[in-house]
Structure formats: C-alpha cells, structure tokens
Image (cartoon, coloured by chain):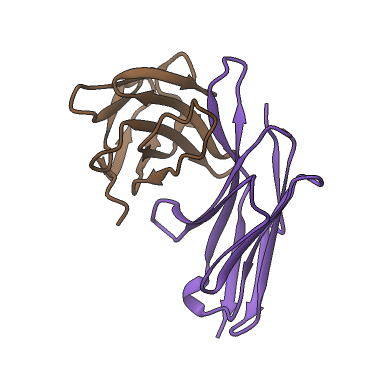
Amino acid sequence: GENVEQHPSTLSVQEGDSAVIKCTYSDSASNYFPWYKQELGKGPQLIIDIRSNVGEKKDQRIAVTLNKTAKHFSLHITETQPEDSAVYFCAASFTMDTGRRALTFGSGTRLQVQP
Amino acid sequence: DSGVTQTPKHLITATGQRVTLRCSPRSGDLSVYWYQQSLDQGLQFLIQYYNGEERAKGNILERFSAQQFPDLHSELNLSSLELGDSALYFCASSVTSGTSGGAYEQYFGPGTRLTVT
C-alpha cells in the first residue's frame, strides 16, 4: 500500500516567520494530495489540496508544492500567526488491491508559533 | 464547522462491550469514511460507504462493522471491545466516491472519543 512520510514531527517558529512541512509518498499513481489542520479537541480541517496535474497552489498565506518526479510535496505557511499553531497532516490518495482509492495520512507535524 | 456531525462526543465503556458511533454527512455528500486516530498509529482509514454500499475497506478489524442508511447517515459498530480500541474515531464525507481516480475532498466531523476501561 501507500506509505507517506512527514517531516518534521515538531516545528517551532517565531510569529511572522515561515514554516515548511514536507511529505514523501511511495505510490507513483497517487494524484491527490490534501493537507489538514487539526486543532486540539477538533477534527482535521481541510486547508488546501493539490492535484497531480499542477506543481503549485496558493491560498493567501498557505501554499503547497508538488514534485511528482521526486514524489514529494510540501506545505508552506508564510507570516505565521499564533492561531496557526496546530497539528498538520499531509495525505496522498492511493489505489488499493481492490482497485478502490483511499487516503493515507502522514504522521503529523505539531507546529507551534511563538508570539 | 465542516457540516459533518458525529455522536456521541465521548463514550466510556468496558472491555467486551459493544458500542455504536453515528455520523451524518454534509448535505449532498454521498460518501462516508471512517477513520481511527490513536496516539501511536495516526489517522488510519477503516472503511468507506457510497450511497449505501460499501466501497472501500482499509485496516478495519473483523470486530468492527459499519453501514450507511438510506438517509445517508452511517453507523460504526465496535464489538468485543479491547483496551487497545481506545481512540478517536472520525467520520468524513465527500461528494464523490473517488473510484474514478479523481480528487475527492473529504471533510471531517468533530470525532467521538472512545475510552475502553
């Protein structure tokens, strides 16, 4: 099955700095890569996603880049704010033995933005 | 608020017992997914239903089962509970089934925290 590795596991930045979280995936057929933000006591919230036919997508302070050749994708948060503090998960779609598709998630990155 | 609702929010039960978790998808979404989140395993895909039919199966134990009803709400049944089943259980929903290979945004509910004592 698909394997998604996520780094770093924890990240501490000063308010206003940028934060970068990186993920690698194993299934070359993966074509959908969402990022989720999970705050304490809440469910994961979809914040941005990218499809395999584009290399970069941006939404205000958040951007995601995809390198299909190297099979890695990254989340970039600029001008970080204390409310960005949360656990971030990357995910990649993969095709199971049955031919059905599912998402597999990275292990998460705990981002702390110091005011 | 994602529009996905889950009940109950918390559940405490004893080993060997059976529980049912409930999920209502976002209005218009036909697919429901169940995930287990534990400290050491991260987010693990359990099972997917699309318009009442089982569509994909992940790492779901035989003691666990699910179904999706005609009104599209879904229930996850966990039986013969063990201490290791203590975890957060999330439901997510999406418009499509994802089988076409295309992208399918999944929106998560707030989760049910299950504690087995």
Give the x, y percent position of residue B24: 24, 37
Q: Is residue A93 left or right of residue B99?
A: right
Residue occupying the far right of the picture: A70
Q: Please, is residue A12 above or below residue A105 in the view?
A: below
Classify the position of the N terminus of chain A by image quarter.
top right
**Chain identifier, brown in the render:** B
Give the x, y percent position of residue B59: 54, 24
Residue occupying the far front of the picture: A53
Nearer to me, A91 or A49: A49
Give the x, y percent position of residue B8: 25, 40
**Chain identifier, purple in the render:** A
- Quarter of the image where one finds residue B19: top left
Q: Please, is residue A65 above or below residue A93 in the view?
A: below
Nearer to me, A51 or A48: A51
Classify the position of the C terminus of chain A by image quarter.
bottom right
Nearer to me, B101 or A102: B101
Q: Please, is residue B55 above or below residue B115 in the view?
A: above
Q: Please, is residue B86 above or below residue B100 in the view?
A: below
Residue at left offset 66%, top offset 76%: A18
Residue at left offset 49%, top offset 25%: B99
Residue at left offset 62%, top offset 16%: A97
Give the x, y percent position of residue A48: 51, 57
Residue at left offset 48%, top offset 27%: B46
